[in-house]
Image: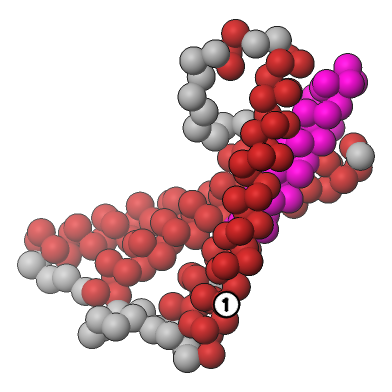
Amino acid sequence: MKELIRLIDTLNDRVGKTVSWLTTILVWVICFDVLLRYLFNVSFAGLFEMEWHIFSLIFLLGAAYTLKDDKHVRVDVFYSRFSEKGKAWVNLIGSLIFLIPFCIVVISSSIPFVWNSFTIMEGSPDPGGLPFRFIVKSAIPIGFSLLLLQAIAFSLKSILTIQGKDATDV
């Protein structure tokens, strides 16, 4: 079980650290867009679309990395007061009831969506927009597949904690 957790964690760690570099690229693209818009009164649809495409990739492909490092958003009214085993139970139940089924639904419903986009070679409907929109759309099932894998690892870590085994050395 620990080897599977390590494998999933390593995969999402590498993907997350690689994707994190897109934030630097996004900052530069936004700065360039603002510079053009406010200094030269020029705007390009493709540049604006590039901003949200990069943001989409960061969000979709980085979600599993966020879960791996336990940095996801959580309503922490009671959770912070729980013991480690109590937190593990909340994490396990939440993953099994909400996160894993949600990932499966998104993956299964997004594949036809992406496939349709690919078959028609979908591009931007805006003049000057970006071609090949199916590339960014393909990040939906990929990102949720990574998140599903990380949810499985998260659940397995919770099981180890509930069993009284050390899940921090994984």
Q: Which part of the image, by quadrant, shows the N terminus?
A: top right
SS type, badge 1? helix
* CA neighbours of label 1 inside 10 A, class few (<14), some (14 to 19), many (20+): few
**x and y, in percent, of residue 163 in the image:** 89, 21
Position of residue 90 in the picture relative to residue 39 (left or right): right
Answer whether residue 121 is visible to the viewer in this image. yes
Position of residue 161 in the picture relative to residue 110 (left or right): right
Residue at image location 78% in from the left, 28% down from the top: 158
Residue at image location 88% in from the left, 17% down from the top: 164
Q: Residue furthest front?
A: 97
Q: Which part of the image, by quadrant, shows the C terminus?
A: top right
**x and y, in percent, of residue 132 in the image:** 45, 82
Q: Quadrant of residue 156?
A: top right
Residue at image location 52% in from the left, 28% down from the top: 74
Residue at image location 50% in from the left, 71% down from the top: 137
Residue annotated with mark 1: 112
Rendering colour mode:
secondary structure
Height in image: 126 above or below 61? below
Nearer to me, 5 or 11: 5
Q: Quadrant of residue 129?
A: bottom left
| Magenta segment boundaries in residue numbering | 143-170
Q: Quadrant of residue 144?
A: bottom right
- Mark 1 residue type: Pro
Is residue 166 one of those drawn in magenta?
yes
Nearer to me, 30 or 93: 93
**x and y, in percent, of residue 43 in the image:** 16, 70
Height in image: 88 above or below 37? above
* SS majority, magenta: helix
Is residue 5 one of those drawn in magenta?
no
Nearer to me, 31 or 134: 134
